[in-house]
Image (cartoon, helix red, strand yellow):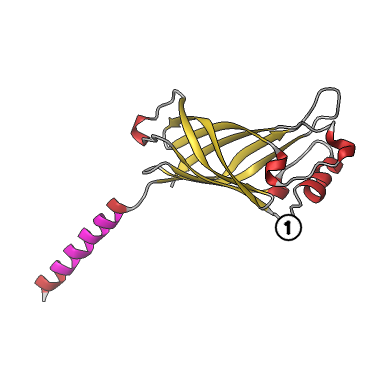
Amino acid sequence: MISGLRLLLVNVVVLFFMVAGFSQTKFITKTGKIVFEASVPSFEEIKGSNDGVSAILNAENGEIAVLALVRGFRFKIALMEEHFNENYIESQQYPKATFKGKLSEFVLGKLSEKPQKIIITGVLTIHGKSKSVTAVALLKKMGNVIGVKTKLELDPADFDIDIPKIVRGKIADVVQIQVDLELKKR
């Protein structure tokens, strides 16, 4: 009887270590930041930021997913925030923006405190429309935290975001987007 319990215990321990060995190392955040700017000279600054962006990075294969709730973007002017949500992004109908992609040639063991350039590719979905994007990301590792920074340039028309003629000259044709994530080991 004791021999059977020992065998069972050994099997449970071996199974535990096998599962732990196959489990994926993930880094996550719920406090990432995205800033976008669509300002043009001589007009009111059009800039919004969201400090509640969620992201997860699979450190074994470089896959990354990012989620931003559209209503989480804040502006200096409340009316601009209202127009952004109601007239342009239509956040009630399209409440989130997502990115799902991969960091090319990502190797966790090669990351250090010195930022490294890595190509990031994937699909960005905004306003219910998806588009493939590629950008350069700067990655660094500080203890159990991986920092990811990247910049994108987007055309609102690619995501069926309609800019009325009356304000078209006050909004940039290309929107600048900056992403800053500090993902912690889970």
Which quarter of the picture shows residue 111? top left
Which quarter of the picture shows residue 27? top left
37 relative position to 43: left or right = left
- What's drawn in magenta, residue-wise? 7-20
Q: Give how far across and how far down residue 74 sits, in percent.
A: 75, 41
Check the image and report above or below for 48 versus 12: above
Task: Identify which residue, 77 or 128, lies in the foreground.
Answer: 128
Q: Amino acid at mark 1?
A: Gln
Name the main secondary structure of what is drawn in magenta: helix
Which quarter of the picture shows residue 47? top right
24 relative position to 125: left or right = left
Q: Give how far across and how far down residue 114 sits, in percent.
A: 44, 23
Number of numbered discs overlaid on the protein picture: 1
Q: Give how far across and how far down residue 31 sits, in percent.
A: 59, 43
Q: Residue at x 28, y 51 (%)?
A: 21
Q: Residue at x 25, y 56 (%)?
A: 18
Q: Give how far across and how far down residue 56 sits, in percent.
A: 49, 46
Mark 1 lies on residue: 93
Task: Identify which residue, 102 or 47, lies in the foreground.
Answer: 102
Label 1, secondary structure: give it.
loop
Q: Residue at x 36, y 35 (%)?
A: 107
39 relative position to 12: left or right = right
Q: Residue at x 75, y 57 (%)?
A: 92
Task: Identify which residue, 65 or 169, lies in the foreground.
Answer: 169
Q: Quadrant of the N terminus?
A: bottom left
Query: Magenta includes 29?
Result: no
Task: Identify which residue, 148 or 118, lies in the foreground.
Answer: 118
